Amino acid sequence: MAKKKEKAESKMKSKENAVGTPSKEKRIGARGRIFEGVVIRKFPKRVTIAFERMIYVKKYERYARYRTKLHARLPENMENEINMGDLIRVQECRPLSKIIHFIVTKKIKDVKEMKTKEKLGEEKKVGGQK
């Protein structure tokens, strides 16, 4: 009897940790690596994000800048709030299709917030050059 209760409680906890909408859609368990990137394309139920990373090239003793693109599942409850240019967080999950192996977990910054910060940074640079 106690074992059944423990199993039921563990199942409930695992459902709480899953990402996605609880109603019509199946919950998708997120696990593994986490990345943050900018939305470069938006499709129904899917987004493409891009982010840059620096890798040290031993031969030339310098760093190379590489750009990575990932496709991620966009849950129905987040479809309206995520737009092109937003900074979002994605987390690895089981393979959902041939190219989709990540799911959107959180929106970090809006496009407008990122643009205002860029403008402020440019103004500081211009002000420092005078």
Image (cartoon, helix red, strand yellow):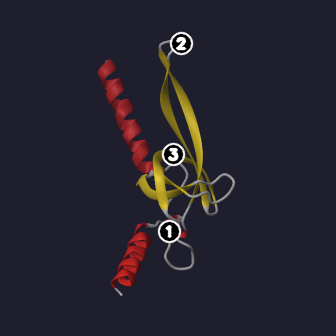
Q: Position of residue 117 (x, y in %)?
A: 37, 41
| Image quadrant where residue 14 sits | bottom left
Tell me the residue at 55%/30% (across/down).
66
Q: Indicate the secondary structure of the residue bearing disc 1.
A: loop
**Does residue 21 lie above or below 101 as drawn?**
below
Depth check, front residue: 83 or 11: 11
Q: Indicate the secondary structure of the residue bearing disc 3.
A: strand
Q: Position of residue 41 (x, y in %)?
A: 61, 50
Circle 3 residue:
38
Q: Seen in the image, is 2 located left or right of residue 115? A: left
**Does residue 116 lie above or below 80 as drawn?**
above
Depth check, front residue: 106 or 8: 8
Q: Nearer the viewer, mark 3 or mark 2?
A: 2
Q: Amino acid at mark 2?
A: Lys
Tell me the residue at 50%/72% (across/down).
21
Nearer-N-terminus badge (2/1): 1
Circle 1 residue:
20
The quarter of the rendered structure image containing the C terminus is top left
Q: Residues within 10 Å of mark 3 (few under 14, many from 20)?
A: many
Q: Nearer the viewer, mark 2 or mark 1?
A: 2
Q: Position of residue 51 (x, y in %)?
A: 51, 39
Q: Amino acid at mark 1?
A: Gly
Circle 2 residue:
59
Residue farthest to the top, as pictured: 60
